[in-house]
Image (cartoon, rainbow, N blue to C red):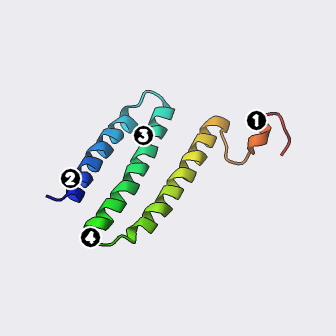
Amino acid sequence: MSVFTVSAIAILVSVAMALGRALLGPTAYDRILAVNAIGTKTVLLIAVVGFMNGRPDFLDLAIVYALMNFIGTLAVLKYFKFGTLRRGFSRAKGGDD
């Protein structure tokens, strides 16, 4: 068993644990954090699988997925805080859009 195989198995186990937190989390923010952690672990898994198969160019895909995960998490957190994605951040501080 190679180091990459052991790493992939460890990442999959941690994804399963984060999935449990996403399903059982006491608050919405715990669930959002767990889903974000699953996205981060997916980026790691894409990179490890790419190196297992001798395709290090999978890192480009992992970077794009990481950016999508980050922007998606920000959008969900903004929706939970403001109730909409339309309103700007300045209005929450009392400023005009």
Which residue is at 78% across, 34% downward? Answer: 93
Measure the C-alpha gap from mark 1 to mark 4.
48 Å
| Drawn side of residue 10 relative to residue 75, left or right | left
| Drawn side of residue 7 relative to residue 38, left or right | left
Measure the C-alpha gap from mark 3 to mark 2.
22 Å
Q: Could you tell me the amino acid type at mark 4? A: Asn
* Nearer-N-terminus badge (1/4): 4
For disc 4, the marked residue is 53
Measure the C-alpha gap from mark 3 to mark 1.
26 Å
Residue 92: numbered disc:
1
Report x, y in % for residue 29.
51, 33
For disc 3, the marked residue is 34
Q: Could you tell me the amino acid type at mark 1? A: Ala
Mark 4, secondary structure of its residue: loop
| Drawn side of residue 94 relative to residue 77, left or right | right
Residue 6: numbered disc:
2
* Nearer-N-terminus badge (3/1): 3
Which residue is at 32% across, 67% downward? Answer: 50
